[in-house]
Amino acid sequence: MKRNNNEVRVVPPVLQGVETGNELFSELLVDDDEVDRRSFSREVVDGVDLSEVNVSSCVFDHVSFPGCRFRESRLTDVLFENCDLSNVDLSGSVLFRVEFRSCKLMGTNLSDGVLNNVLFRHCNARYMNLSMGRLKQVLFAHGDMQGSALESCRLEAVAFDTCSLVEAEFSRTSLKGMDLTSSRLEGLRLGVGDLRGVIVSPVQALDLTRYLGLVVKDV
């Protein structure tokens, strides 16, 4: 069944009752592994191990997380806006109703994770790792995902709207029914079977003929 980008509806985070205070995110985790209903702004959380924490109904605005680890954590109803999560380790984590708006996600590791109702909008996500992940109701919109890894993923109701997927890795990930006509696809890394049923433009199709071993000659 054809599924275009307009049919992927991502449920936004539920953020009612979020409180704005002077607490630092890293300080709240000193005595507890759960943070909820808090807003954090203009903070640097440097090198903190946040593995196996639960974060719910939180807003992060202009927060940087250099060298942090969120391995096997659970994020529910969370908004990241203008945040820097470059090279952050979120492997094995569960994200439910999470939005990343205008964030830096260069090299961010989301491998082996579960993403359900997640939005990435206007993000620099070059070399982001989503390999072996399970993605459902996920929208990537107006983002740079050059060199990102999405190999061996299970995708359900996932859309790429006006994204750069140049040199992205999709090996062993089925793209059947996915509409990629608005995105850049040069240099994709995948197999012939991964392309079966994907929706592309005539120009994109010509570029993808190399996966079939064809040589196109202008006569």
Image (spheres, grey):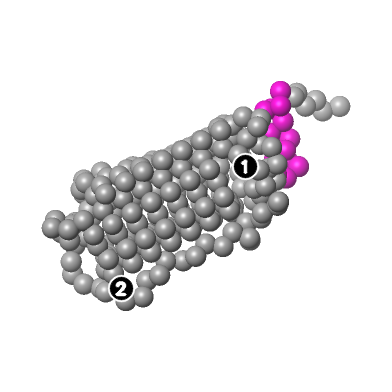
The answer to whether residue 88 shows anywhere in this view is no
Left or right of residue 134, residue 89 in this image: left
Circle 1 residue: 175
The residue that appears at 37% across and 71% down in the rendered structure is: 15
Circle 2 residue: 18
What whole-number distance in Å separates the C-alpha atoms at marks 1 and 2? Answer: 38 Å
Which sits in the foreground, 164 or 95? Answer: 95
Left or right of residue 62, residue 187 in this image: right
Q: Residues within 10 Å of mark 2 (few under 14, many from 20)?
A: some
Left or right of residue 166, residue 3 in this image: right
Q: Amino acid at mark 1?
A: Leu
Measured as percent of width and height from the top left, residue 218 is found at 82, 28
Left or right of residue 81, residue 43 in this image: left
Q: Is residue 139 above or below residue 190?
A: below
Measured as percent of width and height from the top left, residue 197 is found at 70, 41
Residue range highlighted in magenta? 200-213
